[in-house]
Image (tube, rainbow, N blue to C red):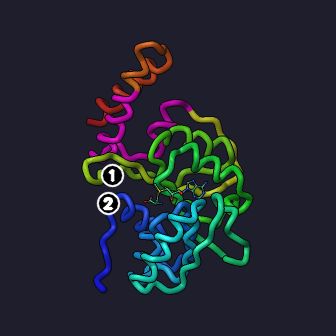
Amino acid sequence: MRLFSLDERLLTCAGLVRDGARLADIGSDHAYLPVWLLKTGKISFAIASDIGENPLETGRQIAEKYKAENIDFRLGAGLDTIRDEDNITDVVIAGMGGEVIAEILSRSGLAKNPELNLILQPMTRSDELVGFLYENGFELKEQIALNSKGRSYTVMTARYCGKKISTSSLFRIVGKLDMSDPESVRYIGKKIKDLENKSRADDSARALLNELRLMINENN
Ligand SMILES: C[S@@+](CC[C@H](N)C(=O)[O-])C[C@H]1O[C@@H](n2cnc3c(N)ncnc32)[C@H](O)[C@@H]1O
């Protein structure tokens, strides 16, 4: 059977998984990401983990349909399903709110392994996630903005370094995006629109909005 294609959002996540990784895909749902990575030979082993039995069952069916081997399905919250002996090297947490991703990381000792490559794709509240990461000893390695089916997304990689740093509101929004990339400008443009609605009644949102507009103008 011909392998399916990933959309741009999941393809970007897949591109940040290291070759030969032992992957945990948390909130895997349909398991498209680990199945695709296994079938293309980029990784050797994956755990598809989800809090819901129904999504997990969908994932099992996709793995069976495409005959993906070396994939374990685990039911449970966040990283609770991952054990030390799984020797996971890379974790993807995609398609959830930034605050949910932050909560998952905060509840896990395993996430504090500096060797672990964390690939995070918040659908909303990416600023909350970036703030959480730095305040809790994680650092961003890289951040990408992308467009998939007309919608703007961000994907970031992070790792635990143990250094706790407080961040500015501007940094929490822009993070490590390369502002010379037009997709980053589009992504920040979306954030500006969100803030415009908020700023009518909020002075700090208005100040942040001005900083963002200035930054966009300086880079273009
Ligand atoms: C919108 S889907 C995202 C699927 C896939 N990761 C993607 O990006 O396309 C979100 C999935 O996360 C699962 N989920 C939500 N909270 C979770 C948690 N705390 N731990 C594990 N899975 C969770 C949901 O059951 C759902 O299947």
Residue 8: assigned label: 2
Q: Is residue 116 above or below residue 95?
A: below
Mark earlier in primary sequence (1, 2): 2
Which residue position is annotated with label 1? 146
At 64% from the left and 47% from the top, the residue drawn is 103
- Mark 1 is surrounded, within 10 Å at the Cα level, by few (under 14), some (14 to 19) or many (20 or more) other residues, namely some
At 29% from the left and 41% from the top, the residue drawn is 186
| Percent position of residue 197, x then y | 38, 22
Left or right of 106, for residue 121: left
Left or right of 11, for residue 130: right
Q: Is residue 36 above or below residue 145?
A: below
Q: Nearer the viewer, mark 1 or mark 2?
A: 2
- Seen from the viewer's position, the closer of residues 137 and 102 is 102
Q: Which residues are magenta?
A: 168-194
- Seen from the viewer's position, the closer of residues 19 and 194 is 194
Secondary structure at numbered mark 1: strand
Identify the main secondary structure in magenta: helix
* Mark 2 residue type: Glu
- Seen from the viewer's position, the closer of residues 174 and 192 is 192
Q: Is mark 1 within 8 Å of ligand 1?
A: no
In the image, is residue 213 part of the stretch drawn in magenta?
no
In the image, is residue 186 part of the stretch drawn in magenta?
yes
